[in-house]
Amino acid sequence: CGRSRSCFACVEMSKPGDPRLCDIIRPGTDGNVVLLGYPIDEGVRRNGGRVGSAHGPACVREFLRTTGTLINPEHNIDLSTLRVTDGGDAAPSGNPHQETAIAGLADLVAGVLRQGGIPFSFGGGNDQSFGSYLGWRRAFPSSMTVSPVNFLTSERIATINIDAHLDVRPLLAGGLAHSGSPFRQMLDDPSFTGTYAVFAAQGSQCSADHARYITDRGGEIVWLSHIRSNPGGAQAAFTSLLAKLSPAVDDIFFSFDIDSVCGADAPGVSCSSATGLSAQEALDMCMLAGAHPKVRLCDLSELNPLIERYRTGKLAAQMLYYFLLGLARRPRF
């Protein structure tokens, strides 16, 4: 159709009698949910990870063409009432300029939020999460400081990072951000109002200093071992975390690093692990997040189709689908 692959515009329509999610995705930024791409892995390179996640957005869009029935008979959910649009990418695919892409993503996220939509960005390196946070902060300014970049907001946000890692590493020399620093940048932001929680973190991959950095700032870490000891498993532990954090905040930022899923289920990531969440647990949590009325923005990070494309790419597309299944259960939709 002549359009760029950075926007979900050319879809192969589903077969007769079997409508699919792809049938309702349209280009634009006016949806109930707006897909945004972050095709950047410069932050992964800076952090010493395996590059290739710059191809993540194109991979997810490819699998969205065949993923997910529009009317799900198992859960009795009809997605045809939702408006799902694709707002394109924060930067041209392959452009290594991370700082420009972060600023572009923040602008896109802010625009979607101001229109009442839920931005769902997928990448790309986990450094995109700071761009998502900046977009939220810019969308609800109560006042502005001397710098036009720094907005202050009276809103409070709970950021839940589903991740094997804590992602609060310091910036590199010269103040360079990377895939391991997005939530330190958020927590160090003078205008940050809210709390930070990491879910499914693995102690073998997390510095004790970084763990103290989070808890000293009132944050919370739900270790993978604690999830495994919960009789209700990941679903019950995540439900409990949502219930604990939501009363004190206005909005929830649901951030999912797919490397929190065990390598057997999601091998195509920048930094895989032999243990972690199962694919089914990831899908269940996405549905829970979609159904929660305070979840206002989401991102999915670190899909690396150069490592493995089919299994992990399809899982990433299914995670978005399950988020939409949850969203369709909200009263306003």
Image: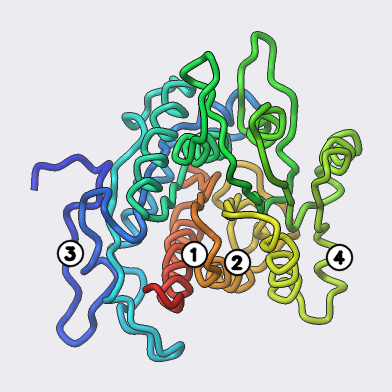
Q: CA distance from mark 3 to mark 1?
A: 20 Å
First in sequence: mark 4 or mark 3?
A: 3
Q: What element does badge 1 sit on?
A: helix
Q: CA distance from mark 4 to mark 3?
A: 43 Å
The reply to whether discs 3 and 2 touch (Cβ–Cβ < 8 Å) is no
- The residue nearer to you, when weighing 294 against 128, is 294
- Which residue is tagged 1? 319
- Visible residue check, residue 52: no
Check residue 12 in the rendering and tell me which mark sits there, or answer none: 3
The reply to whether discs 2 and 1 touch (Cβ–Cβ < 8 Å) is yes
Label 3, residues with CA under 10 Å away: few <14, some 14-19, many ≥20:
few
| Coloring basis for residues | rainbow
Q: Amino acid at mark 2?
A: Ala
Q: CA distance from mark 2 to mark 1?
A: 7 Å
First in sequence: mark 3 or mark 2?
A: 3
Q: What element does badge 3 sit on?
A: loop
